[in-house]
Image (cartoon, rainbow, N blue to C red):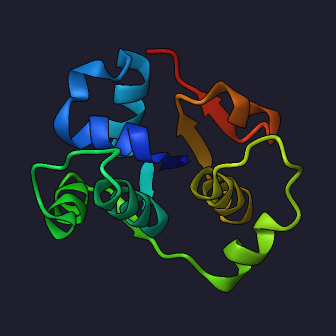
Amino acid sequence: MRFLVDTHILLWAIAEPARIPSRTRSQLESAQNDVLFSAASIWEVAIKTQIGRLHLPVSLEALAASATAMGFIELPVHAAHAAGVARLPFHHRDPFDRLLIAQAMIEPARLLTLDSVLGQYSDLVDVVSP
């Protein structure tokens, strides 16, 4: 199965894996699954770090390298992903989350997220309960 992790799950997987529920952690660790992380998540962390909403003790490059070292696969943002955002209803205003939803639907991949609002978009969204 293919999973796309949202930014929050990505950060937890790298820095605080014990915070991820065991079922989800098993999915992320299974060699039978492909786990994707979006370039949009790195962009989101970059912006939130710059505006002071997030403190990151390592560089963005180190963050991406850690995800790759864990076996996660980088998912670039393609024009089809960006265009897919326009077809989404406005359940959620966050542009990063909307792009992740579009990516999950186009790829397809199951989006793992903590944000219950995102579950309104598609049955491809798995809302993880911490």
Left or right: residue 53 compared with residue 122? left
Q: Report the label total.
A: 0
Q: For this rendering, which residue is in front, 49 or 24? A: 49
Residue beneath the point at 47% across and 46% down: 5
Question: Residue 57: image x %, image y %?
Answer: 10, 49
Left or right: residue 3 compared with residue 93? left
Question: Residue 40: image x %, image y %?
Answer: 48, 65
Q: For this rendering, which residue is in front, 121 or 46? A: 46
| Residue 41 figure quarter | bottom left
Question: Residue 15: image x %, image y %?
Answer: 18, 37
| Residue 47 figure quarter | bottom left
Residue beneath the point at 85% across and 48% down: 90
Left or right: residue 111 compared with residue 26? right
| Residue 120 figure quarter | top right
Residue beneath the point at 25% across and 64% down: 64
- From this viewpoint, which residue is outermost toward the front? 51
